[in-house]
Amino acid sequence: MKRLTVRLLAAALISGLAATGSLAAGEPTVTLTLRDHRFTPATVTVPAGQRVQVVLINHDRATEEFDSHDLRIEKMVTPGATVRFFIGPLRPGTYDFVGEFHPRTAQGRIVAVAAQ
């Protein structure tokens, strides 16, 4: 029984590492948190021309939807959950996003800048 448990844990760990293999490839990651129906940080800067992983952590007691017409993406995040998704590669510029369920307070932007 112990060997089976150890094997299952090892398989789960290997699967998890394989799923995050893109991080090893050097893709940038930004972390956004939701608290009191506000994104923190409200503005993030990312490199233009690269795919970027977004990690969204919801500390609120309500479900929220990350919504961006500029980025053409919608992602639901339930209370206490974390979602991961990719954006880009983006052209240099500013890309707005909101929390679909609390658009007056849950607002933010992603600024893509070209390497200099």
Image (cartoon, rainbow, N blue to C red):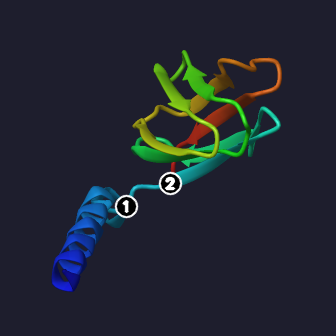
Secondary structure found at label 2? strand
Q: Residue furthest bottom?
A: 2
Q: Quadrant of the N terminus?
A: bottom left
Q: Residue furthest front?
A: 1
62 with respect to 72 (left or right): right
| Residue 96 on image: x %, y % | 65, 24
Q: Real-space Cα distance between discs 1 and 2?
A: 8 Å
Task: Name the image quarter holding residue 103.
Answer: top right
Identity of the amino acid at label 1? Answer: Leu
Q: Is residue 59 above or below residue 95?
A: below
Asked if the residue at tag 2 contacts the one at tag 1, i.e. Cβ–Cβ closer than 8 Å, the answer is yes
Residue at point 78% right, 32% down? Answer: 37
Secondary structure found at label 1? helix
- Residue pointed to by mark 1: 23
Identity of the amino acid at label 2? Answer: Thr
Task: Name the image quarter holding residue 34.
Answer: top right
**Residue 88 badge:** none
- Residue pointed to by mark 2: 29
In-front residue for pair 4/52: 4
Residue at point 63% right, 46% down? Answer: 80
| Residue 114 on image: x %, y % | 52, 44
